[in-house]
Amino acid sequence: MTLTRYAYPATVAEAVALLGEDGSMAIAGGTAASNLPRLKSASLLVDVTRCGLDFIRPESDRLVIGAGVRVADLTVDKLGSSAEAAYLAQCASGISSTQIRNAITLGGNLAYGAAWSDLTIALLALDATVEIAGADGNKQVAIKDFCADAKKAIGKGLITSVSVALKPGIRAQYARFKITDTEIALMAMGVVLSIKDGVIADANVTIGGLCPRPVIAQKVIAALKGKPATEAVFAEAAALAPEDVTIAPNFRMDIPTRARILAVTLRRALVAAGEAQ
């Protein structure tokens, strides 16, 4: 199929109607479009940059971010003063280069569904909710379910926003390992802790970049909950991380080496989160 049309819908409703057509494909930043097999069969590109999705709404109990927000705009001064805002800003600031951050959108990063999509890994640790507009109306999808099959979750619809419930007193840290500053991370992880009276009351740890989809590190979480927030506990929990992930082969580094780096990087992230106020 040959590309024959390029549309600029002005509203989400118009975009959804166009995306319902056979051979259609949404585009925003465009940085990943050339890598998508669908582009080869697309006859209609639907540019959603004029649909009013570039909003950020810090509310009293949640943070709502439009799917059209550029990664470069995910900064503390725009996201607000919550721990969740600082964590997302930390994640966003380390994504690729300035030029790429100025192009990539939140919705595009989620929809692309790459193993190394940092925002997906970060939002999974925050138990975020993805809003998707479709022909039958809007639906709310838990990020965990979205990650299981992003293509199925989106269908012929359009991601419109992501919301994160704000939890008082959490401590969060995003970490990644990469060879150079601007390349894709070989591994990344999100850490969210709730510590009360020196004890880890709750925890969420996510890992990505090592397997096709980001995973929730269940063994690490189990080793943290109810334990004192000490470096020894963090080290013991981080050592279990390779058991939570089926590390895929990679030509740049062998599996045992990546497993060791994963444990070290996660230990440092847990310590940093534990020290955060």
Image: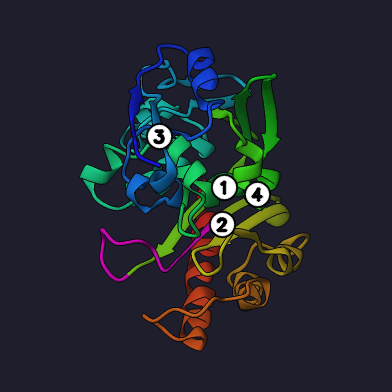
| N-terminal label among 1 and 2 | 1
The foreground one among 179 and 22 is 22
Q: Is residue 61 left or right of residue 271?
A: right
User: In terms of image quadrants, where is residue 220?
Assistant: bottom right
At 66% from the left edge and 54% from the top edge, which residue is drawn? 204
Residue at image mark 1: 171
Q: Mark 3 sits on what residue?
A: 43
Residue beneath the point at 76% across and 65% down: 222
Whether residue 87 is visible:
no
Real-space CA distance between mark 4 and mark 3, rounded to the nearest whole angstrom: 24 Å
Q: Pointers 1 and 2 in contact (CB under 8 A)?
A: yes
Amino acid type shown at disc 2? Gly
Say which of marks 3 and 1 sits in front: 3
Image label count: 4
x and y percent of residue 8 in the render?
35, 18
Q: Amino acid at mark 1?
A: Arg
Magenta part of the chain? 179-190
Judge whether residue 107 can be spotted in this image.
yes
User: What element does badge 4 sit on?
Assistant: loop
Q: Can residue 223 be found in the magenta stretch?
A: no
Q: Quadrant of residue 138?
A: top right
Question: Which of the colour schemes (rainbow, by chain, secondary structure, one colour) is used?
Answer: rainbow
Position of the N terminus, as image quadrant, is top left
**In the image shown, does 68 or 201 lie closer to the viewer?**
68
**Which residue is label 4 attached to?**
149
Sequence-first tag of 2 and 3:
3
Label 4 environment density (alpha carbons within 10 Å; few <14, some 14–19, many ≥20): few
What secondary structure is the magenta-colored segment mainly?
Answer: loop
N-term mark: 4 or 1: 4
